[in-house]
Amino acid sequence: MSKRVAIIGGGMAGICSALLLAASCEVCIIERQDRIGKKLLLTGNGRCNISNTEVSPEDYVCGDKERLGCILAAFGPQERDGFFEELGLYTQTVKGGIYPLSNQASSVLDALRFALTERGVQVKCGLTVTDINKEDLPDGKSLKRLKAGAGSPGLSPGAENEGGRYCLVTGGGVKSRLFDAVIIAGGGRAGVYGEEKQNAFSLAARLGHSVTASHPALCALRCGNDMAVTAGVRANARVSAGGYSEEGELQFTKEGLSGIPVFQLSLYLNGNEREAMVDLLPGFDSDVSYGDMMDRRLECFGDRNAEDFFAGLLNKKLAQELRRRIGMSATDSMSSLTPEKYERLKKLIRALPYDIKGTAGYKNAQVSAGGVPLAELTEGLGSRFAKGVWFAGEMLDVTGRCGGYNLHFAMASAFTCAADIKRSLDVQA
Ligand SMILES: Cc1cc2nc3c(=O)[nH]c(=O)nc-3n(C[C@H](O)[C@H](O)[C@H](O)COP(=O)(O)OP(=O)(O)OC[C@H]3O[C@@H](n4cnc5c(N)ncnc54)[C@H](O)[C@@H]3O)c2cc1C
């Protein structure tokens, strides 16, 4: 009789796991939404930045970079391109980011969906998994037993719970048939679905897993400043906070700061940072060359008023914001500035402070940082606490930068966990 595998979550990680296992096992995806892959449609502004030409552990925040390196190495360019080829998915590369040739996220989802059908994967939508029970114990006791194993100090791979089959409990207490393996690929807390209470982290916790502190990442920052003057401006800038800094096209919004450099920065912040600094002229890498340029400019254009002085150097609205911050009117002559105010202006251009009030929240974030630590999983991404359960995708404590790294990890982790399940169930097709 063929082995049965249940996959909780029909996102990139769940779908890939299903496709990789379909030839060897009977596979069923259980998805709480009315259809699978909804988040995929939003990725890359509808274009789906599915991977990157350069992927290394340094592109991720993760508690165990060495383990992450092994997962990424097992899904190198050859494996990734082979996987795409099997799906009939052609790609193009833009500045290192890999996108579907069609430029449409929907065509990626279609390619995945058609392959699921062709490979006979069962897909059940509109069902939320609320619990995972082991077959051999009466209800309730199974959880206690799993938790007892989970709590053991210094748990090592040899100390795993013995295997067994699992049934899934869905809304209203309905129990599923028994499965030989379960993959939890429920994603994180970010995206349009919001911080739904029944996210899959609670399933991990019921099995005894910890979830490292989660926070919205790859998202905008809300600022306490008056943003009225600059709202809508986009400019190349460097933004820094908490000892990290990122350069790129910064977007000034009504609520605060946004754009790719801010998204990247949000990945590294822990919520305690109160101030972000914006360098409006990041191209001047030395203070000397910057200072010389400004002094020469003052010599040449000092007779201009404050509005005209910055023409050709800074976005008009940003120049207006600088004037606002040091209390100059547009008609004040630059040469009338006191030396102290001039020095302050020079400093502000390189370090314009913004009060951080928080992030744009899970709803507006691309990912939730944090998740199930790799240390609680085997090398094949199986649970050390509940043998027969595996994890894949954003659920794990592995969060990538913008640039296709999160979808890449969803596929790479599916690759690792599918290979391990085949080994474990002895179904090497
Ligand atoms: C707006 C936006 C743009 C993005 N752009 C990119 C990009 O261009 N490139 C990139 O690499 N990454 C991007 N990301 C991040 C990327 O989409 C995710 O990291 C990735 O999709 C995670 O895949 P996953 O399968 O692990 O989780 P998900 O895609 O979140 O899938 C998990 C699925 O599990 C289901 N589920 C959860 N709990 C249960 C339960 N208890 N029972 C049943 N089902 C359950 C959920 O409904 C969901 O469908 C973006 C994210 C967003 C929100």
Image: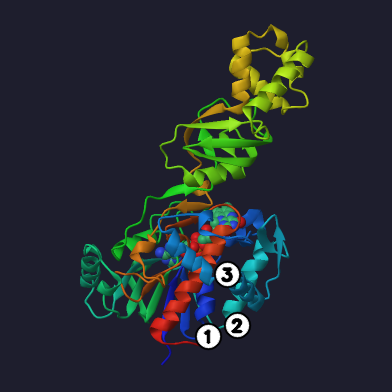
State whether residue 249 is above or below residue 45.
above
Q: Position of residue 347 (x, y in %)?
A: 59, 22
Q: Which mark is residue 76?
A: 3
- Name the residue that disc number 1 marks: 23
Q: Position of residue 337 (x, y in %)?
A: 66, 9
Task: For the N terminus, give its image quadrant.
Answer: bottom left
The crowd level at tag 3 (other Cα within 10 Å; few <14, some 14-19, many 20+) is some
Residue at image coords 67%, 57%? 96
The CA span between labels 3 and 1 is 22 Å
Asked if one can make out residue 34 in the rendered structure from this viewpoint, the answer is: no
Q: Please indicate whether residue 387 sits to the left or right of residue 296 in the image.
A: left
Residue at image coords 54%, 77%? 19
Residue at image coords 54%, 68%? 411
> Which amino acid, by three-letter code, is at mark 1?
Ala
> Which amino acid, by three-letter code, is at mark 3?
Gly
Q: Please indicate whether residue 24 sits to the left or right of residue 171 in the image.
A: right
**What kind of element bears circle 1?**
loop
State whether residue 420 is above or below residue 279.
below
* Nearer to us: label 2 or label 1: 1
**What kind of element bears circle 3?**
loop
Location of residue 169 (image quadrant): bottom left
- Name the residue that disc number 2 marks: 118
Q: Which of marks 2 and 3 precedes in the sequence?
A: 3
The CA span between labels 2 and 1 is 11 Å
Q: Which mark is residue 355?
A: none
Residue at image coords 62%, 73%? 78
> Which amino acid, by three-letter code, is at mark 2?
Glu
* Nearer to us: label 3 or label 2: 3
Location of residue 239 (image quadrant): top right
In this view, the residue in front, 18 or 56, is: 56
Q: Which of marks 1 and 2 precedes in the sequence?
A: 1
Residue extending furthest toward the front: 288
